[in-house]
Amino acid sequence: MSSLVRRTRATLCLQFATKSIRSYLHRPTRHFGSRVVPRHEAATAGLYGFHHLKTAAGFRRFVDDAIERCAELVDHISTMPSSAEIISAMDEISDAVCRVVDSAELCRNTHPDREFVEEASNAAMRLNEYLHYLNTNHTLYAAVKKAEQDGHLLSKEAHRAAHHLRIDFEKGGIHLPPDKLDRLNQLNIDIFKLSREFGENISSDPGHVDIFPASRIPRQIHHLLTPIHHLKSGSSSGLPGPWRNVKEKGFRITTEQRTLASVLQWTADEEVRKMAYIKGNSVPHANLGVLEKLITARHELAQIMDCTSYAEFIVKQNLASSPEVVTSFLRDMSMMVRPKADQEFDKIKNFKLEKSSENTVDLYPWDEAYYTGIMKSSMHDLDSSMVSSYFSLPNCIEGLKTLVKSLFGATFHEVAMAQGESWHPDVLKMVLHHPDEGDLGYLYLDLYSRKGKYPGCANFSIRGGRRISESEYQLPVVALVCNFLGSRDSSIVRLNHSELETLFHEFGHSLHSLLSRTDYQHFAGTRVVLDFAETPSNLFEYFAWDYRVLKTFAKHYATGEVIPEQLVESLLGARDMFAATELQRQVFYSLVDQTLFGEQTAPLSDTSSVVADLKRQFTSWKHVEGTHWEARFSHLLNYGAGYYSYLYARCFAATIWKKVCQEDPLSLATGTTIRTKLLQHGGAKDAAEILHDLVGDGVLKHHGGGIVPDTSSFLEELKLVER
Ligand SMILES: [Zn+2]
């Protein structure tokens, strides 16, 4: 619906689906003090620094003013001014709309006050309706087409903006006859509603299993589960007096993803793992129907847009250009990973056999996390609490400061917020500052888990960078949101290594926004083609694995001792032990996504059997009858037909790391290259051109009319090909 506005997707920022799954702690919500701000307080700013948002109801005025400003700009464009003016007015419309929609999105996901959340939802809904008016406005479309044809009068970036705007209008169906446009609009509304329903079903029906007695559950996950009691079987009869009603203690496992992941990793009792796995992978049942409707609606939408499939509709804008290119890339990767994944499967199975008293064993999906966890920690002598002792959160934030200092010669420090600017006492505001260039942008850090907050980790855009005049640049504002356990009140919050990696990943997205210097906010930071968007974030993950980087900030919380190199070696060893299994899973997810939204060769009656067939064909693991994990795979909504982008990014990042960063990851020279050849351009330059200018040959290949990543650095890193 919002084709005019290229928004950063919150889901950009989800990592691979199996990552970032952590135990979840419910803590009491804390509210701001008074939301009613006295008039005389001049230092009051309003949420995110927007003066409209001093109160929740301010969202209404925020929308009104954005619409009013847009109307003025539409009037101006309708006078057909110069092409350059048309494009800058279009970008200002987009800016006015984006700052409201993006603020509302962040607010909806993180604000502890229900009133703010509701007003933010309403604001987003109202602006979506207005966007529909803009997206189908023929005056604007004609102006953009004129500007595109006047290409020689424009800067390269302005011409690119004109071209993209024209395509975005057409993606919204403006060129269609009225009956088709009506149908398209209806489908977009249906898809929006189905996506919401899918997400709501996931939260409202997480599933549960009850386990008795409590001793079947390992102590370290007790705090994640709910204690329950029942009458011990047989206890109500046959026993005398006081023993007649003996209660037995057990646990209820709510099978939402974080808890399920902990249960599968730590529970020795196979029957418990099996029950939890099956329940967790067969809820919410209602989503099977929702998914089927969603696939059907997207397919019809694609056909109205003259595409044979929704995958084609999505992928044709991306580097890959067509679903055939994506599928062939995925199939190749699947074949390359298969032998090693099979070996890893056998290794896990043999380990299970060694630990078992039986003569033969079968290996099931509920065994994977449990046995690989034991194998990793025993082989590499890893104790997770020991690892965490080097990653106190203040140290990790020091790590982010070290990165920007070494790479960009910039500082990253906390600044005070005006009253009303923050949404929770845990939030910090940081400024990225360069000694010669001044302030470069602002980043809010909202890092701790709390009830009602968006459960994943994400980088939210609040305001995109754009050139206002020769001398003035609108500085970008973003928010990095995570879900670490604890709060800034508890003096010692320690991350595990995977959380550190996530923090660096999201920081890569933040830097993409903070350091891009595009003329138009339409191209700011992460507003790039989908299969390129995850590249900077995947690149920054590498810094979390390099000893030269880690030794600068990873110090023991009590003794100050620098993390031992041997420990980092062990972490790397553990990471690599089952790398093929993990990669195979990602390839499988990507294939499911491409297949479900690909050409519909037969009527779609049973997504589950399609998924089960792909699992049998492309993984080393069994499909468990009756399970359908896709009912909880929310990437199908946000990343529909685009999940492969994560694999593209991993390949690109591997090559960039190897060729640009590995030799000296913390030098100004390395940072300057990353900044000037990658981050600074946002989406203002063609992604393939960016990659080529950054790395030279050997980062991508032309294949079947599209672009695929060169996989050699990535596969070499995973030891899937010989050096
Ligand atoms: Zn990401």
Image: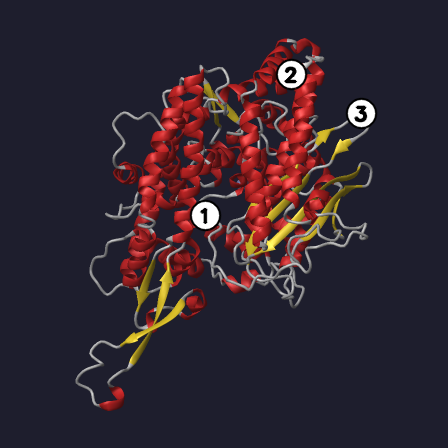
Residue at 51% over, 31% down? 530
Looking at marks 3 and 2 on the same chain, the residue that comes earlier in the sequence is marked by: 2
Give coordinates of residue 159: x percent, y percent. Answer: 64, 16
Looking at marks 1 and 3 on the same chain, the residue that comes earlier in the sequence is marked by: 3
Specify the quadrant of the image occupied by residue 78. top right
Residues at marks 1 and 3 touching, judged by CB atoms closer than 8 Å = no
Residues at marks 1 and 2 touching, judged by CB atoms closer than 8 Å = no
**Where does label 3 land, which residue?**
470
**Where does label 2 land, which residue?**
159
Asked if disc 1 is less than 8 Å from ligand 1, the answer is no
Residue at 70% over, 22% down? 88
Give coordinates of residue 381: x percent, y percent. Answer: 47, 61
Asked if disc 3 is less than 8 Å from ligand 1, the answer is no
Q: Nearer the viewer, residue 252 or 671?
A: 252
Compared with 136, 597 (above or below) is below
**Mark 2 element type:** helix
Give neighbour class at mark 1: few <14, some 14-19, many 20+ (Cα, 10 Å). some
Residue at 67% over, 17% down? 77
Amino acid type, mark 3 = Glu
Residue 41: mark in rendering: none
The reply to whether residue 329 is visible in this rendering is yes
Compared with 431, 303 (above or below) is above
Specify the quadrant of the image occupied by residue 245. bottom left
Residue that protrudes farthest toward the left in the picture: 238
Measure how far apart labels 1 and 2 are at the Cα level: 45 Å
**Where does label 1 land, which residue?**
576
Q: Nearer the viewer, mark 1 or mark 2?
A: 2
Give neighbour class at mark 3: few <14, some 14-19, many 20+ (Cα, 10 Å). few
**Mark 3 element type:** loop
Specify the quadrant of the image occupied by residue 256. bottom left
Measure how far apart labels 1 and 3 are at the Cα level: 50 Å
